[in-house]
Image (cartoon, grey):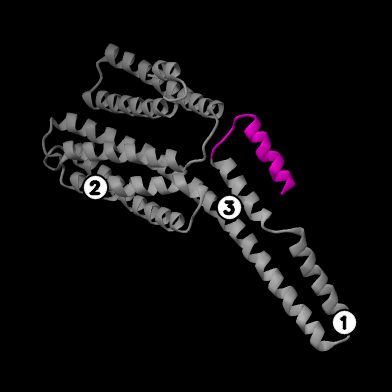
Amino acid sequence: GAQLDIIIDEYERNGLSGDDVSVLKAIRSVLGELTQEEIRKVITLLQSARNTTDPSKSSENTLNAYAGQKSIIVQLRHLLLEYERQQILREIARRFRALARRQGVNMSETVALYKATLGRDARRSKESHRISLQLQATEQSTIHAETSILLKKLYEVVGKMDGLPAEKPRAAVARAKESELGTIVANATEDLKESRLTSAAGNEQRARDIFVELSRLLRPDRDAMTTLKEALKELQKTMVKQEVLVEETKQLAATKKDEDLRDEVEKRQMQVVDETAMISEDIAELAPIADRKST
């Protein structure tokens, strides 16, 4: 407990805050309820039970020690559950972020297919368009299934939480329900199956934005420097992709290659734009100037 107090004080002296600090404080509060006197009493009762020659007195001491231990175990189990829940929420946040990226890619595919078919029914277009539509519908169906699983787990975990650590997870639950995320993803799936590409793209974009929002609500709060460093790493990866696209675009202009290849480059460009937008949103509040430069 004393060591945790030192860590928490160090965080606060340096102006650091977030879920990590909240969890530490929650753990410290549980430990604070376990006094030296409680534990000492259990040990004393066990020693008395072992040393006494009176069977009835020994049984009484053993039962009292057992009751004391059970009380301590209950508190420690509460501590363990709190830690496990926080770990589960971190994983859910990570998976929502991954879904946001996948949804963004599928959205780019949908927009590209709409342009390639000139808005016509892709099911009645050329084979490459039909295959593309089928692949998108399959991916969207998978995203829908994973979304349902994640939301169910989120509701289950947050329903058992209380106190300060539950505030942001509860906000995430409220946002997921209010936005009707499950319905939006399901509608996008049905739209693709029926080749309603404009509607599908709109639902996919809404789903992607909500995935990002939920990920931010559930992930541990980080200090500004950590956030900016992670954004820089992501931006560097995106810049490499952009440089490759620039070279491919130059080659296309010089050689006038087939239109399918042009569509592929354009589709990947949209994906880079979408990834950049996500990075931009991550740092918008922390570094408005850096945000403008990243776009």
Report the magenta residues as a range: 1-18
- Residue type for callout 1: Thr
**In front here: 256 or 12?**
12
- Residue type for callout 3: Tyr
Q: Nearer the observer, disc 3 or disc 1?
A: 1
Q: Earlier in the sequence, mark 3 or mark 1?
A: 1
The residue positioned 77% from the left and 59% from the top of the image is 36
Give the main secondary structure, helix, strand or loop, of the magenta stretch.
Answer: helix
User: x, y percentage for residue 56?
Assistant: 80, 88
**In front here: 125 or 268?**
268
The answer to whether 45 appears left or right of 156 in the picture is right
Q: CA distance from mark 3 to mark 1?
A: 40 Å
Q: Earlier in the sequence, mark 3 or mark 2?
A: 3
Q: Earlier in the sequence, mark 1 or mark 2?
A: 1
Is residue 187 within the magenta segment? no
Q: Residues within 10 Å of mark 1 (few under 14, many from 20)?
A: few
The residue positioned 77% from the left and 84% from the top of the image is 59
Let me know if residue 5 appears in the view: yes
The answer to whether 196 appears left or right of 134 in the picture is left
Q: CA distance from mark 1 to mark 2?
A: 73 Å
User: x, y percentage for residue 48?
Assistant: 85, 76
The answer to whether 35 appears left or right of 121 in the picture is right
Q: Which residue is mark 3?
A: 83
Q: Which residue is mark 1?
A: 52
Q: Which residue is mark 2?
A: 189
The answer to whether 283 appears left or right of 197 in the picture is right
Q: Secondary structure at mark 2?
A: helix
